[in-house]
Image (cartoon, grey):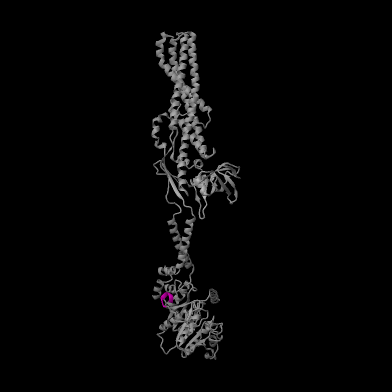
Amino acid sequence: MDSENNVQQNPFDHSLNIREQLTYYIGNWYWFIISVFLFLAGAYVYLRYTVPQYSASTTLMLKDDKKGGVDSELTAFSDLGVLSSVKNNIDNEIEVIKSRTLIKSTIKDLGLNVSYVNEGRVKSEDLYKKSPIQFLVSRFNEGFENRTIAYKIVGESATLYSLYNRNEVKLGTFQYGQTIKLKEGNAVVLLVGDKEKTKEKSFAISVIVRPLEAVTGSFKGRLGVRKVGDRTSVVELSIVDPVSEKAEDFLDALVRVYNQDVVNDKNLIFENTSRFINERLKIIADELDNVERNTEGFKIKHHVTDIASEANLFLNNASEFEKREIETETQLKVIATMTDYVNNSNRYELIPANVLTSDANASGLIDQYNQLILERNRLLKNGTPKNAVILTIDKKIESLRQNIKSSMARLKAALEIKKKDLAYQNALFNGKISKIPTLEREARVLGRQQQIKESLYLYLLQKREETAISLAVTAPNAKVIDSALSSKSPVTPKRQSIFMSAMAIGLLLPLGVLYLLQMMDTKIKGRSDVESKLTIPILGDVPTSLTNEEIIEANSRTSAAEAVRIVRTNLEFMLNQVPDNVAKTVFVTSTVPKEGKTFVAVNLAGTIALSGKKVLLIGMDIRNPKLEDYLHLPKEGVTNYLSTKDLDIHSLIHRIPKYESFYVLPSGVIPPNPAELLMSNKVNALFEQLKQEFDYIVVDTSPVHLVTDTLLIAQHADAFVYVVRANYLDKSLLRVPYQLHLEKKLPNMAILINDTAINKGYGYGYGAYGYGYGYGYGVEVVKKSWIERLKDKFKKEA
């Protein structure tokens, strides 16, 4: 049942020990301090050398004809039909605003491809609108237009300056306004600052002229355009720049350039329409003048002013048909003119939009056609005719052009039918008027021609005035709601966020590194590691010895000596159940070799001997004997005695100098059958005999994880000191003492932690648990150099 409970409470589960973790991290506090300091210093240097960036934004309201947005000042002229041909779409307009063409025009207007910089020791200052000079390149030499130009201009006086190239080589001294020939082209430097101040103080300014395309790409990449809400036509423009005033000026100028571009597109339609009307007016005016001259000549020739008074009744009846025939003839003339224009004009030219009013379908098709032409021209600014979108528009244009031709053909056919009908009706009355003298008929023909020309002429005059009014009141497409305004504080870098991030990283980095090191390092560090895995009593902690073969003497005051004395005291409490008149046997073992069990056995036996007890140290690690090498003794010992019949045991026991009652029985030569020797009856007899002669018997045994030698003689022990070496034994091997204790194979078992480090988070017992031994006894402990400590480490591992 106990075994089952122990299995259920297995201490080797990998549960997190919060206290242990905190102790580990607190023990390495200096790494956190160093890391935080370095990251904060790095953050300070980053902020010191990083140029702050400011954000500027402006808000616009774009006209969206899909939502009926027409400026109030244009509503009085919306019935003219001209304005309806220009339609806006918010998404399309956003793409126009972001186009390279508009951005490049804005950069040209503001001269943003030229930078004036005041070079500082830490960082440079952009002298936007504060530069006392202006650098103009009037002409680029071939191959230099798309390269960056950099020069340094040093003001010498109010009239002279010195010019240096980027390698600080002086190119000469020149006058302001003088054209200078550079390898990149011809340039002029103008003084735009206060000349009086320039006389008092010289200046040194670096001028950088960047390629226009590169600067355009930079501004395009930083420009942000977004719709404010899905149901509004409000758009927000924003940009980030090191100079807040430059960002504001760019946004304001971009809006101006966009509005001007939209106005130019609208005016293009009006100008084409006006030009067409003026051309037609000139032709109709000439025709009307010819008709009037013919009428005048007819009346003069025949000496008449009023003809066919007797035909007034017939004329009155026929007047209505004549009027309608005239209207039809006028419409046919207009259609013929428009058909001729459409057939003979370029397929990508705009068609007059307000000429055909007799057919709403034809007018609508012309409006759609003009809209596609405008959209195609706009896309060509940023693309090529082979672009997929433009090819799609070309197909739509051709389709609309054919539809316009078909519509006008149908309209012409309908009017011709109507004309024939009117002509037929009119012919009835003309038959009745056939008796009217020929002069009257000729006069009527002339009058009818004159009336047609006058009607068409007046119609074109009216449309010309309408087009002029539309051209005069063309309004911009974007209304500025909020002018460009930049942030007062930089958007990047944010000092508080960077310092907080640096501090967080400074804390998390060592935390992560220490955690990884801890996870990778599976070695036992000290008492807390053992206590977390085992419930076996702990005798004490022995810190790292000054030498590999330290032997504690009466006057030893090292930390290791004091630790062994504490172990001796704790051991006496473990052996209090042994009668005083019986020798006490203490076995010393470990899990694997090189854990320091021989060191512990020697110094534990020596410390007990210093207390006045007669002590015998027996070397029972007969497979890998170290005791005789440690104490520089002869090789003969236990194995010789066990393998020889008549050998006296006392001949193999040696007294240790400087000790009155400390004796050692070495292990002896390595036998071929160690297990069989330890199972012999002579082992029992040996312990029975020696217990009669000594107060304490300390036995240095074999490691229990590799061989069974120790378990074969474990019944002779009153107590087992199980040595666990810190920073050497893997935590997983604590299962070995755990299982031995669980199965009670080693009687009266206790753990001794060897080679612990002082003040390393875990502690070795004294510093961590407050005993304070090893200091203040008058014996100075000389600290070894790192070379000596390294040599000792290699000796231990050898």
Picture layout, residue 369 above or below residue 737: above
Name the main secondary structure of what is drawn in magenta: helix
Q: Residue at x 58, y 50 (%)?
A: 166
Point 50% across, 22% down: residue: 282
Total numbered labels placed on residues in the image? 0
Quarter placement of the C terminus: bottom right
Answer yes or no: is residue 752 visible. no
The correct choice, above or below, for 125 with respect to 557 in the image is above
Q: Quadrant of residue 18?
A: bottom left
Q: Is residue 278 visible?
A: yes
Say which quarter of the image contains residue 570: bottom left
Q: Nearer the viewer, residue 12 or 58?
A: 58
* Residue 386 picture location, percent across and down: 54, 38
Residue 541 included in the magenta stretch of the image: no
Q: Percent from the top left, x then y, of residue 687?
A: 48, 87
Query: Looking at the rendering, in which quadrant would you find the N terminus?
Result: bottom left
Position of residue 441 measured from the top left corner of the image (x, y, whole percent)? 46, 11
Front position in the image: 350 or 690 = 350
**Image x and y of residue 459, in percent:** 44, 23
Q: Closer to the camera, 743 or 152?
A: 152
Q: Which residues are magenta?
A: 766-771
